[in-house]
Image (cartoon, grey):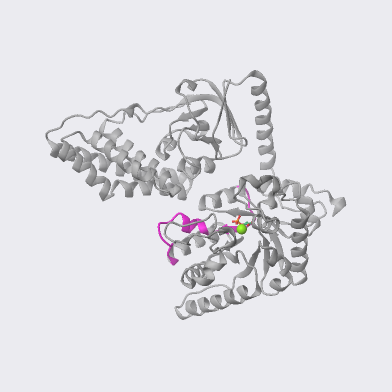
Amino acid sequence: MEISAGKSVLNGIAIGKIKLYKKKSDEIIRKERNDYQQEFSRFKLAKQTAMDQLKALVDKAAEEFGDENAAIFEVHMMLLDDDDFNESVEEIIRSERVNAEYAISVTCDKICEMFSVMTDEYFRARTVDIKDISERLINILSNNVNMEFVLDEPSIILAEELTPSDTLQIDKNKILGIINRLGSVNSHTAIIARALGIPALLGVDIKDEWDGQLGIIDGSDSMLYINPDREILSAFKEKHKEELSRKELLLKLKGKETVTPSGKRINLFANIGSLTELETAIDNDAEGIGLFRSEFLYMESKNFPSEEEQFKAYRKAAEAMKGKKVIIRTLDLGADKQLDYFDLGKEDNPALGYRAIRICLTQPDIFKTQLRAIYRASVYGNISVMFPMITSLEELYKIKEVISEVKKELRDEGYLYHDVELGIMVETPAAAVISDLLAEEVDFLSIGTNDLTQYTLAVDRQNSKLDDFCNTHHIAILRLIKTVIDNGHKKGCWVGICGELAADLSLTEKFIEMEIDELSVSPLCILSVRERICMADTSII
Ligand code: PEP
Ligand code: MG
């Protein structure tokens, strides 16, 4: 038995035969071509074919992976038309008098090298897209000899790096798991694996000889077992069986109400950080979106997303949820969430620094653009808005002033909007302590236990050395939660929890006992939290 470690993108177990996915065109041969005009024509023809293929793939991907992931292939179309890429290929063909395949592969290496030294992980992860379009072109030029990878049986795929196109051409019902040498947790392989619920390990020191052997991916421990011992295999088979039957049992809870045995209804909402997660939330029967982390729109973009771009995303979420609540949290940048195009400056204590609402209140243009988009989208569904990192009443007064200005502007311009519910995230001890005062100004309070824990226990949530000091069940946190719920209720607000603690099944009964109104959890946790609520021990409630 061999054991390896990797970076896991999804909890869950995969057991099956490993199948090596190897591209036949690994080696591109440099050939002399004196007639460079003819090579130009070959290249142009291949480009046109690639464009046609990509157009068809956009539709196929939208059907299989959702619209957001289909956009990967739209990006490929743009890259294929990119001037730098095309000029480099043509220049190499002309100056070196070589075949188009070789010119493409040299250009691909050059661009990937440039991307791979960038500090931004997003750009580093995009090297896979450049490789993908280059491979597509080379395949077309060599008459598609590499495009026939067929799985005869459900298998775990072993690859250097499975590109989005690779993933799409394999029957997804036969992919049990994915093991890649390359790829980051932000790569499209990771995004697609997550969207499809396939356990995947990236960054594994893979060996070709694993091809054909039995493998186990243990997503929760990020471990890989090759040719496992009999005891290990039977232990994982047992775990896998339990996982499957649990999933099936949980599926039976779809469409059921989230109500305790004594009849108390809890709103069970989802936290989402992308539009793919919106689809997963709907699939898992979310009763609303309790936390729409809007910063992903900013992080996925090369510049501040325009009002129109944001409006479209918010409208899409509102429409997809068909009248169920969608709570959009305004921009929560800073600390671990940074943008390449917006320098927040170096800070000694970024978690205590220039972040979230502090940025919005000092950069009114950014804040107003977002609020305009949210209010415009409000007529398309049931949108609410909440503000992160609140510490004082003064901040709320300022927010309300900006909202009044935004509403006036929209009215003057003839836009319609609804008077959306306003809420705050309670994620600083200050906000928890004055939650009675804050509750007078808003409609709801949503407790962000991730930051509330960090600030209450003075434990940096990014520092893994402090894991042992980060007691999320600390009595101080539980008391603050109880205080916030009571204060909110006294002032007529509903109160929810949207931090990770909301999905902690060992606390579900406690939260019910504290009279929580809403729990917002990551989409894949919804059904297990519903199960726990529906089975809560009523003797304590
Ligand atoms: C929180 O702090 O609990 C929270 C939900 O916000 P985030 O994790 O996005 O900081
Ligand atoms: Mg937070």
Residue 237: x %, y % from top left: 65, 26
Residue 219 is inside the magenta segment: no
| Along the viewing direction, whichever of 212 and 454 lies nearer the viewer | 454
Compared across the picture, whether 214 is left or right of 268 comes to left
Q: Is residue 296 left or right of residue 12?
A: left
Q: Residue at x 53, y 58 (%)?
A: 317
| Residue placed most toward the observer, 8 or 68 | 8
Q: Is residue 297 magenta?
A: yes
Q: Identify whether 37 is placed above or below 318.
A: above
Q: In which quarter of the image is the C terminus?
A: bottom right
Residue at the left extreme?
Answer: 35
* Tally of numbered tags: 0
Question: Residue 274 placed where, x, y %?
Answer: 52, 53
Q: Quadrant of residue 93?
A: top left
Q: In this view, does 141 lie to the left or right of 8?
A: left
Q: In which quarter of the image is the N terminus?
A: top right
Camera sees residue 254: no
Q: Where is residue 439 in the image (x, y as percent from the top left)?
A: 70, 71
Can you name the residue that lies furthest to the right here? 539
Quarter of the rendering containing residue 128: top left
- Residue 49 left/right relative to 269: left
Q: Which of 376 and 447 is in front in this view?
A: 447
- The correct choice, above or below, for 370 with respect to 179 in the image is below
Q: Give the range drawn in magenta.
A: 284-307
The residue positioned 80% from the left and 49% from the top of the image is 536
Q: Which residue is drawn at 71% across and 73% down?
A: 437
Q: Looking at the image, in which quadrant does ligand 1 appear?
A: bottom right
Q: In this view, does 20 lie above or below 195?
A: above
* Residue 495 visible in rendering: yes
